[in-house]
Amino acid sequence: MIEQKFQALAKRIKYVAFNASFMSGILIHSLDNSFNIRICGKEIEEYYRVFLLDKDMVLHVQGVKHKKFSKNDIKQYVTTFFTNITNVEPVATVHVPTNIMTQSAFTLTGYKAISAGATVYKYARQLLIKTLMEMKEDAHTVYEHYTKLK
């Protein structure tokens, strides 16, 4: 059952990552990061719910990595991830002579939006896959713990 849940959730990752990347492609830089965090955070909340890791019984199991996060904890987890990747690998910039800038400002803005969207897709997908795999392992750990007690 855990594997079936994992497979169903894994199929959703590309759509969630696309939604996050689409928001980064829109030219509202001050809002896109908060939307990305919100979109990825909602998906991680769904992982908790589906794998039943949000129950109090998980707190007593040794070896569970993601124990009962609150919404603020999830937000901090996602924010930290996106902050770390943006500090490590900056988005490429294009250097253009100033006389061409006036003629192609719109084109360059479009390229930056596409570049930002592609980068966010890559990293949102990476975050969600990593988290989903960890939560699958946590679900197996919880299952093994409680089946040994019987």
Image (spheres, grey):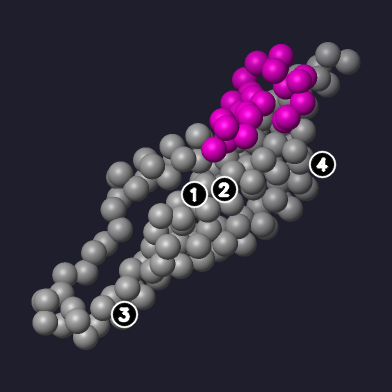
Pointers 3 and 2 in contact (CB under 8 A)? Answer: no
Q: Which residue is mark 3?
A: 106
Crowd class of label 1 (few under 14; some 14 to 19; many from 20; radius 10 Å): some
Measure how far apart labels 1 and 2 are at the Cα level. Answer: 6 Å
Bin the neighbour count of mark 4 within 10 Å (Cα to Cα): few under 14, some 14-19, many 20 and up: few
The residue carrying mark 1 is 34
Task: Using the numbered discs, state the Cα–Cα distance from disc 2 to disc 4 in whole angstroms.
Answer: 28 Å
Inspect the magenta stretch and tell me whether residue 140 lies in it: no
Query: Pointer 1 and pointer 2: residues touching (CB < 8 Å)?
Result: yes
Q: Amino acid at mark 2?
A: Arg
The residues bearing labels 4 and 1 have C-alpha atoms spaced at a distance of 34 Å
Discs 2/4, front: 2
Q: Which residues are magenta?
A: 53-75
Separation of residues labelled 1 and 3 (CA atoms): 25 Å
- Residue type (three-letter) at the residue carrying disc 4: Met
Counting residues from the N terminus, which is met first, the one under dot 4 or under dot 3? 4
The answer to whether residue 17 is visible is yes
For mark 4, what is the residue? 1
Q: Which of the numbered marks, if any, corresponds to residue 134?
A: none
The residue that mark 2 highlights is 38
Q: Amino acid at mark 3?
A: Phe
* Residue at the spot 23% in from the left edge and 64% down from the top edge: 93
| Helix, strand or loop status at disc 3 | helix
Indicate the quadrant where residue 142 lies. Answer: top right
| Position of 69 relative to 33 (above/below) | above
Q: Is residue 60 above or below residue 12?
A: above
| Place of residue 37 in the rendered image (x, y in percent of width and height, measured from the top left) | 52, 47
